[in-house]
Image: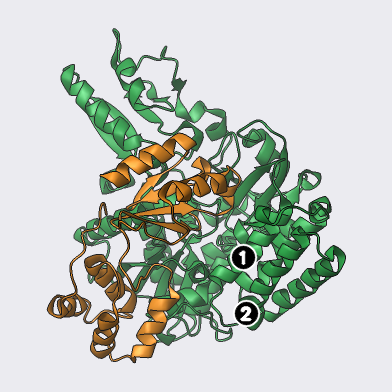
Amino acid sequence: MGLARVAVWDETEASLIIGRHAGREGPLLPVLHDLQMTFGCIPPAAVRLVSEALNLTRAEVHGVVSFYHDFREQPAGRHVLKLCRAEACQSMDGEDLARRILDRFGVDWGDTTPDGRVTVEATYCLGLCACAPSAMLDGEPMARLTPQSIDEIAREVDQ
Amino acid sequence: MSLRVFIPCDAAARAVGADRVATTLGEEARKQGLAIDIVRTGSRGLFWLEPMIEVATEGGRIAFGPIAVKDVLGLLAGQQPFSPAHPLCLGRPENIPFLKRQTRVTFARCGIIDPLSLADYRAHGGFCGLERAKSLGAAATIDEVVKSGLRGRGGAGFPTGIKWKTVADTPADRKYIVCNADEGDSGTYADRMIMEGDPFLLIEGMVIAGFAVGATKGYVYIRSEYPDAVRTMERAIVLAEAEGLLGREAGFDMEVRVGAGAYVCGEETSLLESLEGKRGQVRAKPPLPAHKGLFGKPTVINNLISLATVPAILADGAQRYADLGLGRSRGTMPIQLAGNVKYGGLFEAAFGLTLGEIVEDIGGGTKNGRPVRAVQVGGPLGAYFPRALFNTPFDYEAFAALDGLIGHGGVVVFDDRVDMAHQARFALEFCAIESCGKCTPCRLGSVRGTETMDKIMRGERTEANLALIADLCQTLKFGSLCALGGFTPYPVMSAIKHFPEDFNRPRLHAAAE
C-alpha cells in the first residue's frame, strides 16, 4: 500500500481497468476497488462509466458506492489514518488517545486537514485486539499505541 | 551452516515492530559476519510477547521476546549469539504455560511454518486430510464432518456437516464454496492469523469441501481491514495453482474477494449479496444458501475456522475431534483474549473452560493490574458478563442460556473504570452505523436507542427511558432478519441487567461523546 499516488480522472484508463474484470462473476466490487486505488475515489463520471460497462443502472452503482464505508466520492488526504474505535481498543483507553490525535491534527472523524496532509477515519476493528489500541496508517498496522505514538504518527504524516 | 531465525510476519507482530527487528537483525548479523537465515512465519498467538523471535537449535527452537530493535545487538553479543542466558529468553516456546496448556488442532502449524512454503506445509502434516477425503469418497467425507460434531465457528453454531450434506443433496449445474473471512467482531483475530500464518490450511479445507459437495469454485471473502491477509492468501492461491492443487486439473478454482468496510457483510446472506456486486443487504431465509446461495446456486458458506478445522478432522478421524469438548459443543475453539488483558492472545482449547479460568488464569487479569469488572464475549453483539458469572462454561448452549453468545470466540476484558451505560450506548450506536437498512427496527431503532441512552446518561426520566430501551430491544430481537439487529439487545440488556448502578447516575453529557 504505502502512500497513495492518485491519478487524475481519465476515461480511457478507467475503461481499461473495468475491462480487466470482464468475464468475472459479480465484478462490481473489484472494479470499484481498482478504480479507487488508481483515482483515489469513485467520481460521478466513474459511476456512469461503470454502469454502462456492466449493464447496470447508475442508481444501482451509486447505491453500492454509497453503501460501503470504504468507497469515497472525493479523494482522501495524502495520508489516511484509520483509528480503531471498537470495544477492545476502548478497553485500553483508545477513545482518549483518538481524541488527542484528532485534536493534534485539528480535525473531526472523517475529516481531512485543510492542507490535504491527512484524513483521519474511524474503523471498527483491525484484528490487532490483543495489542490495543491500534491504528492503520496508509495500510500499515500500528499497535500498543501510547501518547508518545502521536508524535511518531505526526512525523510520518509530515513526510 | 547458517543459523535459522524465525520472525513473525503476522500483522499484529508487524504492528509492534517485527519488520524493524527483522531488518536490524539481518543488518547486524551481516556486519558481524554471522550467517543467519531469517524465516518469516505466522504468529504463535502469544501477543504480549510479540515481536517474539525463535532460533533453531539442536534441542528445538528457543524463543525470545518481546524483542525491540534496541535488543538486537544484545542478542548477537557475547560468545554465543542468542544465548539462553539472555534476560529476554523464554526457553522452548512449547513450554510457555500459555501455549503448553492449549490443545492446538486448527492452529497446530500457525507460527511454526513459513506460510508460503508448500514444502513446510507438507512437512507438517499438510494435505493428509485431503488425501484421506479422496480415499473415503465424497459421501463418507461429509459423514466424517457430521460425526466430528463441528459447528459453525462464526457464532451461529450450525452443524457444518449438515450444511454440506444439504448442498451435496441439491442438484445443480454449478455449486460454490464461500469462506466467510469477514472477521469484523472486535476482539477476534483467529481468521486473520490463519490467513497470514497458514493459508494452505484454508485452501485444503475449501478443496475438501468442494470435493465433498461437488462444487467447482471457491471464494474467500476477506475484509478490507486485513490487507496483509489479502496479500498472503492471494499469493498462496497462486502457489497452489502452480502445483496443480487448484485450477482446471484439480477441478476447483479459488479466488479472493475483498470487502469494503461493511460489518454487516459478515452475515452470510449479506456477504453473498456483496460477492454478487450488490449492496450488502441481508436476504430473508428461506431459501437457505445451501439451496439458493451465491448467484442462486447451492452454496456452502462457512466461517474460516470451520473450513480450516476440516483438514485435521479428516486427517486424524472424526472421533478424535468429537472426543474433545462439552455437551453439544464438540472439539476445540480458538479463544481470542483481547483488550485490557495481561496475557492477550489466541488460546485454542476444548470447549468447557469457565469464563473465569479464561480471563483470570489464562489471561492473567487486566493488563494494568486493576480489577476486572466486565467481559464482553462474542464481539459487539455479545453480552457483557460480570465477575458473578465467571463460572459459566465456554460452550454454545451455556452462553445462549444466559442471553449471550460465544460468537467467534472473542473475549474483551474491561477494568473497573468502564462505564457500562457508555458501552450499552456504543452497542446501539454501532448498530446504527453498520445497519444495512433493510429492517426498520434495526435501521431506526438503533438510532432512537442511542438517543434514549443519551437521556438516561443525562439522568432524564431514567426509569421510563430504561423501560423504553427494554421494549425497543424486544422489537429489535424479534423484528430483525439477521443477527445485527437481532443480537444488539445482548450487550445492551446485559449491561443494564448486570451493572444497573451505571444507569442510575447522571453525568455530564460530554461523557457520552
**Amino acid type, callout 1:** Glu
Marks 2 and 1, Cα distance to the nearest angstrom? 19 Å
Camera-side residue: B195 or A21?
A: A21
Q: Colour of chain A?
A: orange
Q: Is residue B69 above or below residue B206?
A: above
Q: Is there any visible trace of residue B9 in the rendered image?
A: no
Hey, what amino acid is under mark 2?
Answer: Leu
**What residue is drawn where x is 66% and y is 44%?**
B414
Subunit bearing disc 1 = B
User: Which residue position is annotated with label 1?
Assistant: B429
Q: Is residue A148 left or right of residue A75?
A: right
Q: Quadrant of the C terminus of chain B?
A: bottom right
Q: Which of disc 1 and disc 2 is earlier in sequence?
A: 1
Question: Going by the image, does B244 lie left or right of B137?
Answer: left
* Kind of element beneath mark 1: helix
Residue displayed at 39% across by 56% down? B226
Image coords of residue B450 (percent x, y)? 67, 67
Which secondary structure lies at badge 2? loop
Q: Where residue A96 sits: x, y (%)?
A: 56, 45
Residue, far left: A12
Q: Which residue is mark 2?
A: B481
Image point (31%, 80%), residue name? A25
Residue B239 drawn at (x, y percent): 23, 56
Where residue A66 sits, quadrant-wise, is bottom left
Asked whether the residues under marks 2 and 1 belong to the same chain, the reply is yes
Q: Is residue B355 visible?
A: yes
The tint chain B carries is green
